[in-house]
């Protein structure tokens, strides 16, 4: 019974990672991160990636609030 309590539990994600979200939109993940790093405006990034400013804002907000992914659980 004690062994059952010592088993490791794999972390799980509550939502897709930023990489998955950029892939879904056809946005190059590394270029998107570079744009964030360089504080490029949403409109400029939207034009570059061919997506809406709203989509860029959503991706930026994901990064600012959750980082690259949102993994929860126990190790």
Image (cartoon, helix red, strand yellow):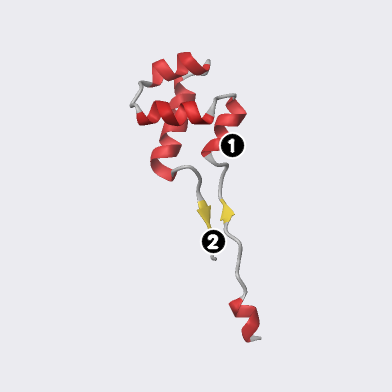
Q: Quadrant of residue 1?
A: bottom right
Hey, which residue is sitting farthest bottom in the picture?
Answer: 1
Q: Nearer the viewer, residue 15 or 22?
A: 22
Q: Residue at x 52, y 37 (%)?
A: 18
> What residue appears at the point 52 percent right and 18 percent down from the top-left corner?
51
Snapshot quadrant of residue 45? top left
The location of residue 58, given as percent across then percent down, is 46, 31
Crowd band around label 2 with a 10 angstrom C-alpha radius: few (<14), some (14–19), many (20+): few
Q: Position of residue 33 (x, y in %)?
A: 44, 31
Residue assigned mark 1:
20
Q: Secondary structure at mark 2?
A: loop
Compared across the picture, whether 18 is left or right of 8 comes to left
Task: Name the residue at 54% across, 26% down.
Answer: 28
Which residue was labeled with disc 2?
73
Q: CA distance from mark 2 to mark 1?
A: 20 Å
Q: Are marks 2 and 1 in contact (CB under 8 Å)?
A: no
Q: Is residue 57 above or below residue 72?
A: above
Say which of 12 and 8 sits in front.
8
Q: Looking at the image, is mark 2 or mark 1 earlier in the sequence?
A: 1
Whole-percent x and y of residue 2? 62, 85
């Amino acid at each position: 019974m004690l062994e059952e309590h010592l088993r490791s539990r794999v972390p799980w994600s509550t939502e897709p990672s930023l990489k998955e979200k950029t892939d879904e939109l056809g946005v190059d993940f590394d270029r998107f991160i570079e744009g964030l790093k360089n504080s490029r405006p949403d409109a400029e990034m939207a034009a570059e990636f061919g997506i809406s400013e709203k989509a860029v804002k959503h991706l930026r907000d994901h990064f600012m609030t959750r980082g690259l992914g949102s993994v929860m659980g126990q190790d």
